[in-house]
Image (cartoon, rainbow, N blue to C red):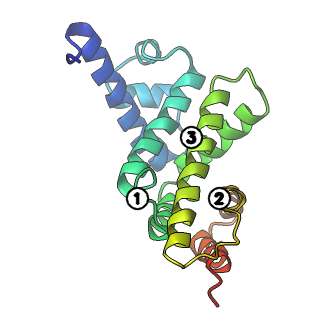
Amino acid sequence: MAAPRGSYAKGIAKREEILTAALDVIARNGYRRTSVRELADAVGLSQAGLLHYFASKEELFQEILRKRDDVDMASYGIDTEQSIDGLLALVAHNTDVPGLVQLYAQVSTEAAGDPAHPAHEFFIARYGTIRGAFAELIRREQAAGRVGADIDVDSTAALLVAATDGLQTQWMLDPSFDMVEHIRSFWNLVTRKP
């Protein structure tokens, strides 16, 4: 397949620039304290110019989350060589980007409550992907003898996702809450470590 040319390629590049800049701005300022104007300023556009690249403000924030996932998956091996150490490193990283965690929590809650929300299908697919990655991790650990064969892989993967999101909510409410240690404790229950 040929590489995109002309204004189409420039549009794709500008969209990526917007999303990359948005990750930094939201991580630094927080979701609630970041305006579309600030995101536009970060890439030298007007608000209207920035929104030209997205169907709506909701789509912009969904795409910021998609970009965050892409960066995190590449950085922590979530999509390929998922390991518990990669997950723990990602959870620790999230404590350094509270604005992005707030964005995730806000948009996922809005999307869950409204099937017509632009990010509704994104989150359905995202949860399916994450559960699948965690299930593969558990299967590999079973094959290596570190997780019992009697563990229901799909249920445990779903519980690991739920634990991660729930612990993240507790951390947002109380930043002294140690998400990493609680995920490690959950994993020790799965692997039956003392």
Quadrant assignment, res 68 = top left
Q: x, y percentage for residue 187?
A: 61, 74
Inspect the image, locate mark 1, and give the three-letter code of the amino acid beneath it. Answer: Glu
Q: Identify the residue at image location x=64%, y=28%.
A: 121
Q: Which residue is tagged 2?
A: 157
Q: Which residue is tagged 3?
A: 33
Quadrant assignment, res 56 = top right
- Circle 3: element type: loop
Does 175 sit left or right of 78 as displayed?
Answer: right
Q: x, y percentage for residue 14?
A: 31, 22
Q: x, y percentage for residue 65?
A: 51, 38
Q: Identify the residue at image location x=55%, y=63%.
A: 139
Question: Which tag is nearer the camera, tag 2 or tag 3?
Answer: 2
Q: Which mark is residue 81?
A: 1
Q: CA distance from mark 1 to mark 2?
A: 15 Å
- Circle 1: element type: loop
Does 166 sit left or right of 73 as displayed?
Answer: right
Q: CA distance from mark 2 to mark 3?
A: 34 Å
Q: Which mark is residue 161?
A: none
- Nearer the observer, 6 or 194: 194
Q: Residues within 10 Å of mark 3 (few under 14, many from 20)?
A: few
In the rendered image, the vertical position of residue 132 relative to residue 108, given as above or below: below
Q: Residues within 10 Å of mark 1 (few under 14, many from 20)?
A: few
